[in-house]
């Protein structure tokens, strides 16, 4: 047994075992750091470099897919953290939003050089790219607002969402996740002909969120007794509507080319 080996070997054996343990921990840490860096690099946004409209559409599609993947994770962590009153998860979501906003801002800052690089016959690409970056900023702003107010609500020790609110929010989150997954597939495959179908589905989801908003209005008038929860829930629903509208606007950019 280990105890017997230690007894026979004394301090030297203890030292060897400690060294081995440290080496194993160090190796695992390095593997984790390497894997994290690879994932971050894979999901990082890239500036458009093509000088043609087709090339810009294809490059932008890759960024859009990455944004949808990251926003989906942020949204899921925010809703989960809010419902479970988990500050650690909410803080993680808020941090991820900050990183995403910085990267989208970098895309915005590169627009001057992007336009300078375009062929004269491809000036339409600049309008398209400006529209896409603006929509990506709106998407990030919406999930950022939701994550920040959710973190603030729980950090200030306000009450958790009520069961019906949590159930409704979970239902919306599930439908948003499905839409994010569909949009990722379309943009990964660059199947731009599928975009009109996605717009129809998003408009349907927007109407459903509106129904939840009206339900909360009715509850507020009749049975609701928590101003903080009501304000938070209304704010989240309205921002989710803005998030969906931003995604519709983003998709519409591809239908105008």
Image (spheres, rainbow, N blue to C red):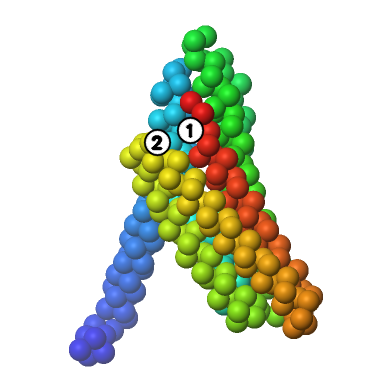
Compare residues 127 and 212 and report the one nearer the observer.
Answer: 212
Q: Are dots 1 and 2 in contact, CB under 8 Å? A: yes
Percent coordinates x, y for residue 242 in the rendering: 64, 51
Q: Residue at x 52, y 9 (%)?
A: 120
Q: Residue at x 59, y 29 (%)?
A: 130
Q: Is residue 247 above or below residue 25?
A: above
Q: Quick check: can you spot residue 70?
A: no
Residue lying furthest top in this view? 120
Q: Which residue is mark 1?
A: 254
Compare residues 139 and 197 and report the one nearer the observer.
Answer: 197
Percent coordinates x, y for residue 123 in the rendering: 54, 15
Q: Quick check: can you spot residue 227?
A: yes
**Is label 1 in a helix, a strand or a loop?**
helix
**Is label 2 in a helix, a strand or a loop?**
helix
Q: How many marks?
A: 2
Percent coordinates x, y for residue 176 in the rendering: 50, 59
Q: Which residue is mark 2?
A: 192
Q: On the rendered structure, is 131 left or right of 51? A: right
Q: Residue at x 59, y 75 (%)?
A: 166
Percent coordinates x, y for residue 251 in the rendering: 50, 39
Compare residues 33 and 183 and report the one nearer the observer.
Answer: 183
């Amino acid at each position: 047994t280990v105890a017997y080996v230690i007894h026979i070997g004394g301090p030297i054996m203890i030292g060897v075992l400690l060294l081995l343990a440290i080496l194993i921990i160090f190796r695992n840490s390095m593997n984790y750091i390497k894997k994290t860096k690879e994932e971050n690099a894979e999901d990082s946004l890239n500036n458009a470099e093509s000088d043609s409209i087709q090339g810009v559409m294809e490059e932008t599609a890759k960024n859009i897919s990455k944004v949808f993947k990251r926003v989906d994770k942020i949204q899921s962590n925010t809703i989960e953290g809010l419902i479970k009153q988990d500050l650690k998860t909410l803080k993680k979501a808020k941090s991820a939003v900050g990183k995403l906003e910085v990267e989208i801002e970098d895309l915005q800052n590169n627009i001057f050089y992007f336009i300078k690089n375009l062929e004269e016959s491809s000036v339409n690409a600049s309008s398209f790219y400006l529209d896409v970056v603006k929509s990506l900023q709106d998407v990030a702003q919406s999930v950022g607002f939701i994550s920040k107010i959710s973190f603030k609500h729980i950090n200030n020790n306000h009450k958790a969402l009520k069961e019906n609110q949590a159930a409704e929010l979970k239902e919306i989150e599930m439908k948003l996740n499905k839409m994010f997954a569909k949009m990722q597939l379309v943009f990964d495959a660059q199947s731009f002909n599928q975009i009109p179908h996605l717009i129809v589905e998003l408009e349907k989801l927007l109407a459903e969120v509106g129904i939840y908003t009206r339900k909360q209005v009715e509850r507020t008038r009749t049975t609701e007794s928590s101003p903080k929860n009501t304000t938070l829930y209304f704010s989240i629903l309205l921002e989710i509507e803005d998030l969906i509208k931003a995604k519709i606007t983003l998709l519409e950019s591809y239908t105008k080319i």
